[in-house]
Image: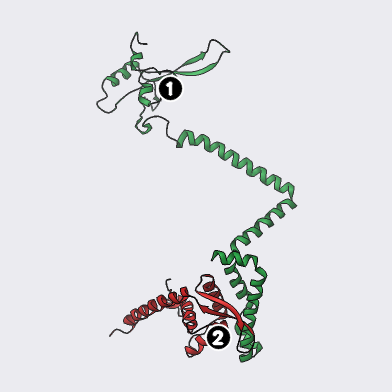
Chain colours: A red, B green
Amino acid sequence: MAYCFPKGFMGTPEKPGDLVQGTLDMLVLKTLAQGPMHGYAIAQYIQSTSRRELRVEEGALYPALHRMELRGLLAAEWGVSENNRRAKFYRLTAAGRQRLASDSEYWSRMTAAIALIMDPA
Amino acid sequence: MLLERIHALFHRRRLERDLDDELAFHLAMRAEKEGATAARRRFGNPTRIRETCRDLWTFAALETLGQDLRYAVRTLTAAPSFTAVAVLSLALGIGANAALFSVMDVMLLRPLPVRHPEELVEFVRAHPDGAKMTNLPQEVFEFFQRDSGGVLSELLAVSPSGDVFRAGGPPLRTRTHEVSGSFFPMLGVPPLLGRTIGPDDDRDGGR
């Protein structure tokens, strides 16, 4: 999977805090590496772990979750949430774990390459 | 992915309910933290999210196509005279085009059904005033047949001749051409039956 730079990367600046297109999948996979979670917990985790720099729109999160479930990267089960509500819990599949590994590797290479240009030694 | 979609096709109601429940849960969790109004405002349009997710699980494009087709059939049967006129004009248009194309295809597009049609050239006489004639004296044909300066490997001559009325059985009017003996071997057109005339037939006493 190829990552795209945000639309504003070369031209008009985007609102800060919007997720770089395509990285949401990776962040969700990384979040779920800790164990099964429902959608709300995933959004909360990404927001708090990024010190509220990243906010996850529901309109992007749920289509992403369902797409990855369809592709077999995630598996889902209905369970009971911490406050006793019926909730859909997502977890990584073997394919999802594999995708996370290759995405992380690609991400570190990309950010390192960009850093070389942005902060020349 | 196909299997999951087919599965979802037969469990459409459950898919809808699951999507509803999932988003309702998320909204409820946010409402607990931020208050119901703020949660709903920031959540965006739940119907939109639900539709985006549902389209992932279904053959959305195919189903829309099916709906459109059914709608078209209903509309057309509701106006039979309009439908008749439309179908008729389409049929005439398509028919005329097909007929015209089959003629053009044979005349212009398809190569002549002979050996090396791309190597054929035609001798033409040009008058100073621009008129062109394809009839040439027999002597010219024989001259070039003996020696065309290495340009042509073979020559053939064709001359339209009169109508023929066949004897035996009902009279039949047929357009005929007289051709030189080189005609059939040069074009590589074999006869269905018997033999064609050959170069030997050009000579007196040939058979």
Tag 2, which chain? Answer: A
What residue is drawn where x is 66% and y is 72%?
B14
Residue B11 appears in which quarter of the rendering? bottom right
> Where on the picture, by quarter, is residue B63?
bottom right
Lateral position of residue B85 relative to residue B197, left or right = right
**Picture quarter containing residue B2?**
bottom right
In the picture provided, is B15 more to the left or to the right than A17? right
Local SS, label 2? helix
In the rendered view, would you say B178 is above or below B24? above
Residue A10 locus on image (x, y percent): 41, 76
Q: In this rendering, which labeled residue sits more in front, label 1 or label 2?
A: 2
Asked whether residue B40 appears in the rendered view, the answer is: no
Q: Which residue is mark 1?
A: B191
Q: Residue A40 location, x and y as percent?
A: 57, 84
Task: Give the x, y percent position of residue A78.
Answer: 61, 79
The answer for which chain carries disc 1 is B
Disc 1 residue crowd, few under 14, some 14–19, many 20+, Cα 10 Å: few
Residue A12 image point, x, y percent? 45, 78
Check disc 1 and report its element: helix, strand or loop.
Answer: loop
Q: Residue furthest left?
A: B149
- Name the residue carrying label 2: A41
Considering only vertical position in the picture, is B207 above or below B52?
above
The amino acid sitting under disc 1 is Pro
Q: Amino acid at mark 2?
A: Ala
Given residues B62 and A32, the one toward you in this image is: A32
Q: Few, some or many C-alpha atoms within 10 Å of disc 2 (few <14, some 14-19, many ≥20)? A: some
